[in-house]
Amino acid sequence: MSGTAASEAHGIYSFGTRAEEQAMIVMKFGGTSVGSPSAIERACSIIQSRADRHPLVVVSAIGDTTDRLVGAAEVGPVAGAEVLMGIRDRTESITRALVSGGAASEMVLFLDQAMAEASDLLRTLDSSSDGASPSAELDALLGIGERISSRLVTLALVHRGLAACNLDSRKLFISEARHGGASPLIEPTGERLRQTVPPIVSEGKVPVIGGFIATGEDGSPTTLGRGGSDYTASLAGAALGAEEVQIWTDVDGVMTADPSLVESARSLPLLSIREASELAYFGGRVLHPSTMLPAIESDIPIRVLNSRHSEAEGTLIVAEPSESETVVKSVVYKENITLIDIYSTRMLMAHGFLAQVFAIFEKHETPVDMVSTSEVSVSMTVDRTESLPDILEDLSEISDAEATPGKAIVCVVGEGIRYTPGIAAKVFNSLEGIRIRMISLGASRVNVGFVIDENDLEVAVRRLHATFFDEPRLRKGQLQ
Ligand code: ASP
Ligand code: MG
């Protein structure tokens, strides 16, 4: 899509033409990029150095705050009080390292109020049957992390002399009234953002919002799902017609593999949106999978950058990148996968069987990731297993079904895969000796994926990375 075509397109995520809009960018900082006083200082200087591009700043909760809040809900109000105390103390010490005087007291007061609210929520959750299952109260509890971090980053920016102001994301982002990960409602959200943000930005102020949180159309607290701050950023970028959405994280952009598994993993300068979507979904560990949707719709580039290494160019994700020489861009994986094998002789020559099978997953609201079928069997993978016992019970009425946990999906991703014969052969050669339980060449043909035992994961990822990234490089070097 060309820039002009995009600005004329009135897709679901964007409204109006860019010409009428205030030129601006969206800068999102993840948990580790606001995880300590020095990280927040770094984030603030990055924001300050780009103030002339009129940023809207989106922040995640500090470090692992959201995980800790989930933990508090799991252990209940008594043990949870200690978890809250831990969050409180850490946040207070970060606050005091960053700001002083009135700003510090204001922040500590806010923190105490937030913690009182959190402990009330823990008590309410405790009185309901399962405190850790999705609910408005749990969403309200988890959202406290972003409310705290956005306020603190605002104060830190003001402390440096920047005219920053904290906006409440709950008043800007409207979602469906679903808990534990709601879909945003694009129109009301876009309207509110466009009403609120551009006037602030044109006054030269820097608005700061918490990612992840929203309000359901029924007025209840919601979230956009774990890792959802990226989504907040791209939704805002699309609604505001931003020039770019920057995702500031703690790695040098999107990598050829998880650097904790593969030492020679390196960052990719350019990716297509389709590649990035596959990577995000299959555990690229950089972007929330939904992040790309608004960007595709509005043709807004996303840049993934390292806040510890801000001069590096990071990874640019665009709709139609220029031709690339590398066929395979990245080797990604997803752990904790459960494989479900379904056998039925009824399936033989019958129609409607698969529809019945999928209806069961639909009924239990469990997404299926990968599917492969033969005449008498279907295999599929799921990563959400809350409803697995019910699913298996329903499946047992129409088939013999068996679930095996402890699997991993490994995926080789790259647009070039569909034009390049022999990729699958190369993949299988590298996996010699490893038991492959299922294979799929996605319809988009941007990836080849397969299911293996979790125990084989490291070896598989390392071998594939060596095949597609290290060996050709070596050979090229040798020829020169
Ligand atoms: N703080 C939320 C989480 O950890 C959202 C985010 O970081 O994107 O899931
Ligand atoms: Mg996060």
Image (tube, grey):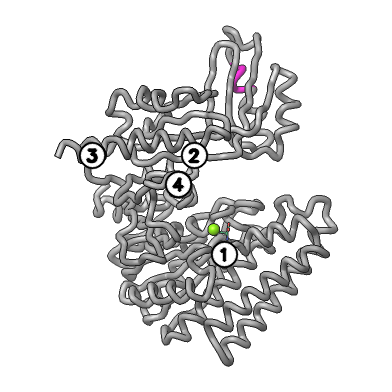
Magenta part, dominant SS = helix
Q: Is residue 48 above or below residue 395?
A: below
Relative vertical location of residue 152 with respect to residue 123 in this rendering, above or below: below
Report the disc number at residue 102.
Answer: none
Q: Is residue 177 magenta?
A: no
Q: CA distance from mark 3 to mark 1?
A: 37 Å
Residue 373 locus on image (x, y percent):
54, 18
Image spot of residue 185 (x, y percent): 53, 54
In the image, 220: left or right of 442? right
Q: Who is closer to the viewer here, 473 or 406?
A: 473
Q: Where is mark 1, residue-wise? A: 63
| Residue assigned mark 3 | 325
Disc 4 vs disc 1: which is toward the camera? 4
User: Label 4: which residue?
Assistant: 258
Residue type at mark 4 is Asp
Q: Which amino acid type is marked by label 1?
A: Gly
* Residue 353 lies within the magenta run: yes
Is there CB contact under 8 Å for labels 4 and 2? yes
- Identify the residue position indicated by label 2 in the image: 333
| Crowd band around label 1 with a 10 angstrom C-alpha radius: few (<14), some (14–19), many (20+) | some
- Between marks 2 and 1, how big is the CA–CA gap? 23 Å
Residue 141 drawn at (x, y percent): 69, 63
